[in-house]
Amino acid sequence: MKVTKRDWLFATVVAIVLGILLLNTGKEKARRVPADDRHRPFLQRLARGADREEVERECATCHNARSIALPGNHPPKEQCLLCHVRKG
Ligand code: HEC
Ligand code: HEC
């Protein structure tokens, strides 16, 4: 198959669009729950198959308006672990 000028143009456009998508997902990425002494018990309970919604209800005992507040631009706050624990 002969690669024409139009093929190159198409490939370039695809590459640019993919690049923009990748950059945006990088920016929006929530940090992982740290594997420190405070958070490890939660992660272990999850790994053992505990109910996610039950585990994350306890996040608010520390992460609330009074103590370790979330950033002002934080996305919708329920279900912490959907965003902050991902595989891979
Ligand atoms: C015992 C108190 C406590 C509980 C409970 C707790 N956290 Fe934290 N969390 C902290 C503190 C303190 C920090 C900031 C210092 C640090 O990195 O350890 C933090 C930091 C974080 C960070 C930011 C890490 C970073 O890289 O900046 C995330 C995300 C987080 N917590 C999520 C959670 C989630 C989700 C839960 C519920 C499963 C949870 N935390 C429960 C105390 C707590
Ligand atoms: C819809 C996805 C989503 C949910 C649900 C969510 N977060 Fe986040 N969280 C994020 C993103 C994205 C950031 C990074 C925000 C930024 O820096 O602009 C963040 C930032 C944070 C930070 C600051 C750490 C940092 O990145 O500097 C903490 C702490 C945190 N979240 C804890 C929680 C807790 C606790 C809950 C549950 C009450 C929760 N999050 C629910 C997506 C989410």
Image (cartoon, grey):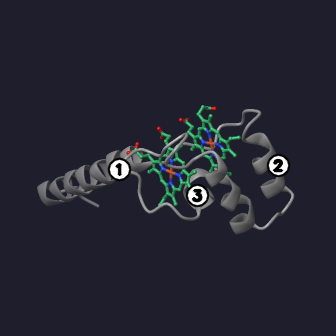
- Tell me the crowding category of disc 1: few under 14, some 14 to 19, or many 20 or more residues within 10 angstroms, Cα based: few
Q: Amino acid at mark 2?
A: Gln
How crowded pointer 2 is (Cα within 10 Å; few <14, some 14-19, many 20+) is rated as few
Residue bearing the label numbered 2: 44
Q: First in sequence, mark 2 or 1: give its number.
A: 2
Which numbered tag is attached to residue 21?
none
- Answer with left or right where residue 51 lies relative to residue 65: right
9 or 45, nearer to the observer: 45
In this view, the mark in front (2 or 1): 1
In this view, the residue in front, 37 or 12, is: 37
Mark 1 — residue? 73
Disc 3 is placed on an element classified as helix
Is 69 placed above or below 83 here? above
- The residue carrying pointer 3 sits among few (fewer than 14), some (14 to 19) or many (20 or more) residues within 10 Å by Cα, namely some
Circle 1 sits in a helix, a strand or a loop, which is it? Answer: loop
Asked if residue 87 is positioned above or below residue 31 in the image, the reply reads: below
In this view, the residue in front, 22 or 78, is 78
Numbered circle sitting on residue 80 = 3
Indicate yes or no: mark 1 CB to ligand 2 under 8 Å: yes
Quarter holding residue 26: top left
